[in-house]
Image (tube, rainbow, N blue to C red):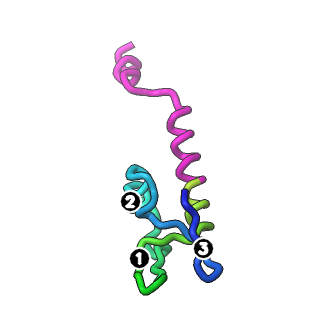
Amino acid sequence: MPLETFKGIEFVRISSMPKEQQERIWQTFESEKIIKIVKDQALMNDCILYADYAAWHSGFTAARKQQADQPSMQGQVGKLAFE
């Protein structure tokens, strides 16, 4: 993830993330933590403090890993009900 720094503020831009991650951010990230930064007279309204992004990303990655590690129950519920 491209980390940017402006006036000592470390941040990432949502628009610079891969598409899948952009979609996840917009769906799951706390909207009040998305900040606006004016740099070179341009408004960047899709910025996230790097610390907030890192915390979100580690939680998101852990949740995805946990889902991948759980055995699938698909097809087993009906089987158990009729055994």
75 within the magenta span: yes
Q: Secondary structure at mark 3?
A: strand
Quadrant housing the C terminus: top left
Identify the residue at horizontal 58%, vertical 78% (top origin): 6
Q: Secondary structure at mark 2?
A: helix
Quadrant housing the N terminus: bottom right
Q: Nearer the viewer, residue 69 or 47?
A: 47
Q: Secondary structure at mark 1?
A: strand
Label 2 and label 1: CA atoms lie apart by 16 Å
Give the magenta range. 58-83
Q: Is residue 36 above or below residue 61?
A: below
Q: Nearer the viewer, mark 3 or mark 2?
A: 3
Q: Is residue 45 above or below residue 79?
A: below
Few, some or many C-alpha atoms within 10 Å of disc 1 (few <14, some 14-19, many ≥20)? some
Few, some or many C-alpha atoms within 10 Å of disc 3 (few <14, some 14-19, many ≥20)? few
Q: Pointers 2 and 1 in contact (CB under 8 A)?
A: no
Q: Which residue type does callout 1 highlight?
A: Asn
Residue ID for mark 3 = 5
Identify the residue at horizontal 60%, vertical 53% (top origin): 58
Quadrant of the image occupied by residue 69:
top right
